[in-house]
Image: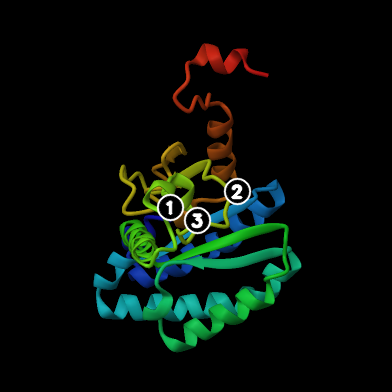
Amino acid sequence: MDGNGRWAQGRGLGRLRGHESGARSVESITRYARKLGVEALTLYAFSTENWGRPTDEVSGLMKLLGTYLRSQRQELLDNDIRLIHSGDVSQLPEDVRTQLRRVELATDHCEGMVLNLALSYGSRQEILAAVREIAEEVQGGRLQPEDIDEACITSRLDTAELPELDLVIRTSGEMRLSNFLLWQVAYSELYITDVSWPEFDERQFDKAMAAYRSRQRRFGKTGAQIEASP
């Protein structure tokens, strides 16, 4: 969800105003994704690298996150959306962690869509944690090296309960993954738009979905093989 700060600065506003506008896009896109029947939506809300931003911006983002969690609890329940998270949330302020736990518990029964907030998240760190867990199990005799396969690693990632990742949307025109779901993105379709996140609305989401539907997903096979399959 890139471009909040630059969007605001381009309008003579403070960067936090851009994040506030971005939060409104989160609400509308989450609601719209649920309406379209999206099974799971992961939003890269705050990366491990974002802790290096100016202190006042980080503080403002944490307050904005807490406000979002408090205000959206009923909205998520009304739309049958289950909230989960990826990332090391131990670094988040205690009040934010408390709000996150409350909303996750309150929506645990919801089945319409899963909303996964990537908070203090970094994919390299996620993979490293999975590798360490596997190494400890091997060392303890609970896992044999020959049993380590893709499924073994996938099951130890933060996204273990989510379906395969089909589409990654990056706003604001940046041409990189920025440590986001590096394992999960192996065969995902990528959609890059120059539109900043505060301006990414339902119409823009429709464009991304239309681009996704127009592509032939081959997973290493030839186009002819895909066309010939049932």
Q: Is residue 170 visible?
A: no
Number of numbered discs? 3
Location of mark 2 (residue): 202
- Label 1 – label 2 distance at C-alpha: 35 Å
Q: Which of marks 3 and 2 is in front?
A: 3
Circles 1, 3 touching at the beta carbon (< 8 Å): yes
Q: Which of marks 3 and 2 is nearer the N terminus?
A: 3
Indicate the amino acid at tag 3. Ser
Disc 2 secondary structure class: helix
Q: In which quarter of the image is residue 14?
A: bottom left
* Up-down relation of residue 12 to residue 146 (above or below): below
Q: Identify the mark at residue 153; answer none if there is no mark.
A: 1
At a point 39% along the width and 72% down the height, the residue shown is 88
Q: Earlier in the sequence, mark 1 or mark 2?
A: 1
Position of residue 227 measured from the top left corner of the image (x, y, whole percent): 59, 14
- Label 3 – label 2 distance at C-alpha: 33 Å
Position of residue 52 measured from the top left corner of the image (x, y, whole percent): 24, 71
Mark 1 closeness class: few <14, some 14–19, many ≥20 residues within 10 Å: some
Residue 5 falls left or right of residue 84:
left
- Label 1 – label 3 distance at C-alpha: 5 Å
Q: Which of marks 1 and 2 is in front?
A: 1
Q: In which quarter of the image is the N terminus?
A: bottom left
Position of residue 50 measured from the top left corner of the image (x, y, whole percent): 30, 67
Location of mark 3 (residue): 155
Position of residue 17 measured from the top left corner of the image (x, y, whole percent): 41, 70
